Amino acid sequence: MRFMASYDLMETMRNTQQWLGASASSLGSYPAFALVPNPALTMMSAWGEVTERAFKRMVTKPGWNIHSVACADGRDHLISIEKVIERPFGDLIHFEVQGRETMPRKVLLVAPMSGHYATLLRSTVVSLLPDCEVYITDWHNARDIPVSEGKFDVEDYTLYLVDFMKELGPDVNVIAVCQPAPLTLAATAYLAEIDPDAQPSTLTLIGGPIDPDATPTEVTDFGNRVSMGQLEETMIQRVGAKYKGIGRRVYPGLLQLQSFITMNLDRHSKAFSEQIFRVSRGESTDGDPHNRFYDEYLAVMDMTAEFYLSTVERIFKHSEIASNTFTINGHQVDIGKITAVAVKTVEGANDDISAPGQCVAALDLLTGLADEKKASHLEPGAGHYGIFAGSSWRNNIRPLVLEFIDQNAAKPKPEAKAAPAEKPKKAGGQPNLTAVNS
């Protein structure tokens, strides 16, 4: 109960800040106060508006907000979201472009489960939609999953990916962004052993910690500075009574958000103070750069305790992927079994989360893969976010990834055509021997 009380305390503090912001905004905007112009009241209203929005977003799952996309035919096509597979901890969803023929490129985006929702990859999805059939893993917030659904750790995550790949078939091209890169590599290797015909055509790993010790950063080295006991004592809580997952052990999103903001406290403080002044001057809108960024950044989700702890212990502390000793249900996965899937790694030269060297380490593990099926790219000047959603992705990386897919994607097997039926004999008893070429 102690950990449930601390979870509820954090939610109470968040709720209180949201209420204070709403109250300040309403009070400062009271019509009667307009008779006595006072900059303090204007600033109070602006502070309240920014504060209420910020704390409200922390418990709100963002929408995809992708309504249409312009295609090669010059028309805007509406987008509908379809669930291909529904599971307790995450779904496989498809962005259906209405009125457009199925595109030959089929792409599965594997979204991170590292505190933010899959909507963090919204701009990545938008950039791929005109040229691809896009699928994505949509992970659920652990606080909304009843305890009766059981556990969810790194092995369960990997098996979800295996099932998603098998569902989409061998012509799918997988792109894993950041945190899931090691587990996506393991899932591909697992398929190579148990169901080779279900392997994807290509695998692109973007900024993932395949070998965190290759070039340690403050983020990837965190697991080596603390013991598992310390992590469990300080980071793990139980979901409170407000949510469906009451009693589930989680790494709370609010606690994760505190860590995110602390890493760049000065930058975030400056951003919010400047936004308050913009609101006071009437220069802010719902779609301004600050709100677009922080509506997504502040929306955090709880991770199951077993997923967070097993990630730290197995991926970072014991380097099971880097040492090729990862197991699933007692079966050791051998990354060297990948022999047919073309693999490309992408890194950002200025990435301070998964520094250059961590992701490209995957290529050394692919001992059974021919060199011509391996590729890597280091994007100059790009940080972590830029390699999958910023200008570096749009202008440089995306074209390279699509080119890699086109060069290595499995060619569909031509369907066997039935032999043409023999035509009736002409008068005189001679058959019509005209051949039909196809």
Image: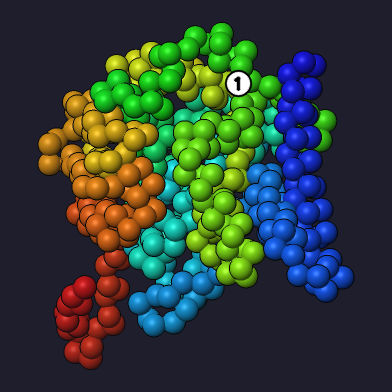
The reply, left or right, for residue 288 in relation to residue 434 is: right
Q: Residue furthest bottom?
A: 427
Q: Nearer the viewer, residue 8 or 303?
A: 8
Q: Which residue is mark 1?
A: 235
Q: Quadrant of residue 134?
A: bottom left
The spot of residue 127 in percent (x, y) is 39, 62
One can see residue 49 in this view: no
User: What residue sits 46% from the left and 51% below the top?
Assistant: 121
- Which color scheme did the rendering employ for the protein? rainbow
| Type of amino acid at the residue the image marks with label 1 | Met
- Compared across the picture, whether 382 is left or right of 274 comes to left
User: Quadrant of the image for the N terminus?
Assistant: top right
Name the spot of residue 367 as percent of width and height, x first. 18, 26
| Residue 78: % across, % down | 54, 73
The answer to whether 389 appears left or right of 432 in the picture is right
Q: In this rendering, is residue 433 above or below 360?
A: below
- Which residue occupies the extreme right position in the image? 32
